[in-house]
Image (spheres, rainbow, N blue to C red):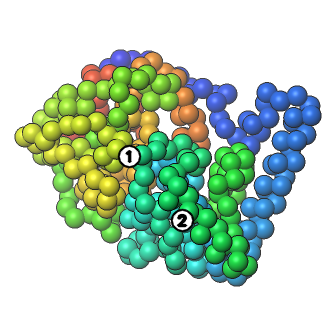
Amino acid sequence: MSQKSHIFDHSVLIDPKGATTIWYGQKNLNIFGKLHYLKIVLKAKKQINQFYNKAIKEKECYYGPFKGEFGHFLLHNLPFLSNLHKQGVKIHYCGMELHRGFLVDTNGNSIIHRYYPLRDFFAEVSSSSNDTIPPIDVQKEIEAFYAVAKKSGKAFLDIADHNMYWFVFRNWQLVNNRQHVYNINQVYKTANENSCVIFPRKKGNTVTPNNGGPWDYIEIAKLVAPYFDKVYITGHPSMSAEIESEGKIEVCLSTDNKVVIEKCCNAKLIITQHSGAIHIGCYTNTDVLLIFNGEPPIKGLIDTLRFRKNLTQQPLQYAFNKEQIVGHIKTLSLNK
């Protein structure tokens, strides 16, 4: 792997045995465990297919609650909801209020018939796939949604069911191509800027196999600033490192994702660690540079690439040190 190049062979970057396919969940089980797991899978597939067929037939459904990670929203929930909306289904959705800005079609119209919003609680509780345990007041909102959904008699998919959601539903969408992407670039783009967006993920000094080690984001911003007219530092305040604006570098952290989306739509490049933010480019038509402070493989990247197939043909670019970050920016500048 060349230290001067930002082009890498994916076989070096991924762990080929790390894909969380449907059958990944039974690999360490004994024969009795495998049989039990098979029952879970078959039950989940039946449940999902019944939901989908009924929703398409009746043109109305209940879906939720989504209370999890940003990447899960962009990869496994937004494209599925868009698929339902494209087929004329009225969607009653329980999910995070802060994601509302993404839930629109190419004309900026909401794809949700009725929204059951959950307040932003990520300053209080860390997110985890869709297994996040929210504060009590939010749990009460979810319970109220459950009551309405079950009473309605309409198709209802409870995505809080861990086994159904994690092992089956995510993969079912992929295999059956039950996803659609509305390009929201034309909705939120306000300028054609020579700008860059950096998501300063806050992980302290923690080194993880998924995200690598920490970066000095103000240093990265200063390194790339000579090649752009503006460098925006954006993301959710609770999940972002603290940085001060200076010169071309403008900090615009916000709990309003419309701000984040606009900056990404206007930009030439998104720079982020291996986090949910890498998928924003699928919806805003923006190139993405994934930065990983460490040596490959990148845990979870095989799933990232697998689940992006339905969403975009746009390849991810990679950098493993500051030299490679600047090298990629220089190449981008030469080709603009």
Q: 210 or 267: which is nearer to us?
A: 210
In the current view of this chain or complex, which residue is farthest to the front? 136
Residue 58: quarter of image: bottom right
Residue type (three-letter) at the residue carrying disc 1: Ala
Q: Residue at x 31, y 26 (%)?
A: 215
- Pointer 2 residue: 141
Tell me the tag on residue 123: 1
Q: How many marks?
A: 2
Q: Is residue 216 left or right of residue 91?
A: left
Q: Residue at x 30, y 65 (%)?
A: 188
Q: Is residue 115 left or right of residue 89?
A: left
Residue 9 in sight: no
Q: Residue at x 30, y 46 (%)?
A: 237
**As displayed, is residue 252 above or below residue 14?**
below
Tell me residue 247's x, y (percent).
7, 40
Tell me residue 197's x, y (percent).
26, 45
Q: Secondary structure at mark 1?
A: loop
Decide: few, some or many residues near mark 2? Use Cα within 10 Å; few <14, some 14-19, many ≥20.
Answer: some
Dots 2, 1 in contact, CB < 8 A: no
Q: Is residue 157 left or right of residue 266?
A: right
* Quadrant containing the N terminus in the rendered view: top left
Residue 50: quarter of image: bottom right
**As displayed, is residue 27 above or below residue 232?**
above
**As displayed, is residue 180 above or below residue 328?**
below
Q: Tell me which numbered mark, 2 or 1, is placed earlier along the sequence.
A: 1
Q: Secondary structure at mark 2?
A: helix
Residue 115 in sight: yes
**As displayed, is residue 193 above or below residue 328?**
below
Q: 213 or 173: which is nearer to us?
A: 213
Residue type (three-letter) at the residue carrying disc 2: Glu
